[in-house]
Image: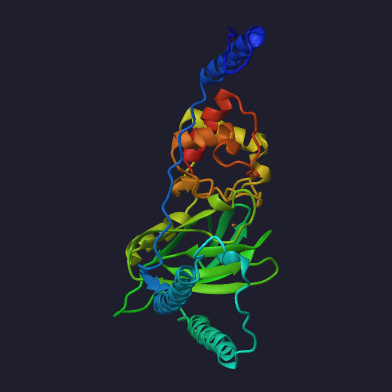
């Protein structure tokens, strides 16, 4: 009787056993590696049916209308399909041999299936055009907050030109009021590389960030809190991890945030952090990152002047904690495959000091 291991004949047994042993050894050595990276928190995409800001509110009614029309079309098509499938099903083994009667030139049917879709499309175009014009023509008050939002592969640069603030991946705006004074935020959209799309479902519909073009949108949230958004236009490998947060604050909290962002971070006092500051300038971090009033002037990566005040790192890929920052610096690719921040091959001492220094940037 023949003997099989995993379906191989007995004469192959020594090779199969050796392959299995190698496989087990390989698994054991990779499992024994000390580098256990934390799993980044996964954020749910917010609901367009629960808008908490204009212009998302202005889009709710047209969205319902479009969905209702599409649902109607779906039901009619499905009903006709099911009717045809049942009524004209084969009724015997000979049934399919005979060609069914061919119908040509029915004026009524052809008119119906041309005119009705044209009318439906016309209604949808009018509804969309009205919403677009309504949102585009919205006058902004003189004191509206101005933001310049620049899309990069794969993060968001955020500038407040009037306030002199530059940050990344986390927009802060004041809450508006329906009865009192409106506080909308005007957002100028640009791109540094490819087409991206700004989308914070509960605040506003999508608007693209197109290279060599300036687009505009605005938000006017009526509720405080953190609103999750994301890039809504495929822009490369890490498109899915180009996340955005909008932190809507009370006017007082927003003012506090502005004051803090304008102040330079205090000098590190801790020995390890002082070493980290030195390492930051000795390594090539400065080529890509900017820290105000220091020799770090790079603009390819996010501005780090107030890095420690931000909730996430890697454009929302992980919570901004010392552990995640450490994992990010060990190998940015492990949290965000294909990202443009290189693995700097840092020594454990450099890692510890850089983490300590970056934590002081607040
Ligand atoms: Cu940026 Cu997708």
Judged from this view, the residue extending furthest toward the left is 179
296 sits left or right of 119 in the view: right
Tell which of 185 and 271 is nearer to you: 185
The quarter of the picture where residue 105 lies is bottom right
Height in image: 231 above or below 79? above
Q: Residue at x 66, y 38 (%)?
A: 342
Q: Where is residue 117 shown, x and y percent of the image? A: 55, 84
Residue 41's quadrant in the figure?
top left
User: Quick check: 165 left or right of 297?
Assistant: left
Q: Nearer the viewer, residue 219 or 259?
A: 219
Q: Residue at x 60, y 41 (%)?
A: 337
Could you tell me residue 10's position as x and y percent? Answer: 63, 8
Residue 245, relative to residue 73: is it above or below? above
Q: Quadrant of ligand 1?
A: bottom right
Residue 58 place in picture, x, y as percent: 41, 78
Q: Nearer the viewer, residue 134 or 353?
A: 134
Q: Position of residue 343 (x, y in %)?
A: 64, 34
**352 vs 104: above or below:** above
Q: Residue at x 56, y 90 (%)?
A: 115
Please say whether residue 185 is visible from this viewpoint. no
Q: Is residue 153 visible?
A: yes
| Quadrant assignment for the N terminus | top right
């Amino acid at each position: 009787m023949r003997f099989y291991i995993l379906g191989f004949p007995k004469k192959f047994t020594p090779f199969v056993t050796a392959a299995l042993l190698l496989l087990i050894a390989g698994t054991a050595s990779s499992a024994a590696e000390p580098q256990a990276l934390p799993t980044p928190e996964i954020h749910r995409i917010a609901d367009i049916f629960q808008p908490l800001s204009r212009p998302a509110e202005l889009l709710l009614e047209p969205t319902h209308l479009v969905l209702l029309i599409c649902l109607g079309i779906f039901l009619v098509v499905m009903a006709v399909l099911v009717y045809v499938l049942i009524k004209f099903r084969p009724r015997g083994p000979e049934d399919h041999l005979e060609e069914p009667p061919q119908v040509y030139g029915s004026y009524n049917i052809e008119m119906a299936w041309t005119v009705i879709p044209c009318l439906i499309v016309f209604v949808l175009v009018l509804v969309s055009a009205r919403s677009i014009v309504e949102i585009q023509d919205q006058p902004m008050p003189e004191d509206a907050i101005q933001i310049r939002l620049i899309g990069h592969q794969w993060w968001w640069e955020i500038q407040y030109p009037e306030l002199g603030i530059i940050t990344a991946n986390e927009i802060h705006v004041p809450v508006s009021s329906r009865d009192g004074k409106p506080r909308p935020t005007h957002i100028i959209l640009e791109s540094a590389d490819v087409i991206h799309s700004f989308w914070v479902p509960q605040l506003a519909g999508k608007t693209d960030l197109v290279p060599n073009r300036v687009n505009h949108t605005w938000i006017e949230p009526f509720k405080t809190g953190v609103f999750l958004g994301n890039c809504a236009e495929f822009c490369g490998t890490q498109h899915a991890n180009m996340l955005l947060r909008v932190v809507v604050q009370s006017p007082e909290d927003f003012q506090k945030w502005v004051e803090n962002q304008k102040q330079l971070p205090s000098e590190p006092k801790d020995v390890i952090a002082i070493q980290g500051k030195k390492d930051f300038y000795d390594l090539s971090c400065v080529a890509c990152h900017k820290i105000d009033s220091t020799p770090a002037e790079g603009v390819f990566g996010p501005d780090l002047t107030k890095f420690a005040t931000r909730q996430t790192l890697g454009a929302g890929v992980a919570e901004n904690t010392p552990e995640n920052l450490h994992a990010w610096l060990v190998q940015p690719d492990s949290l965000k495959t294909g990202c443009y921040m290189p693995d700097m091959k840092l020594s454990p001492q450099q890692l510890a000091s850089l983490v300590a220094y970056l934590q002081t940037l607040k």
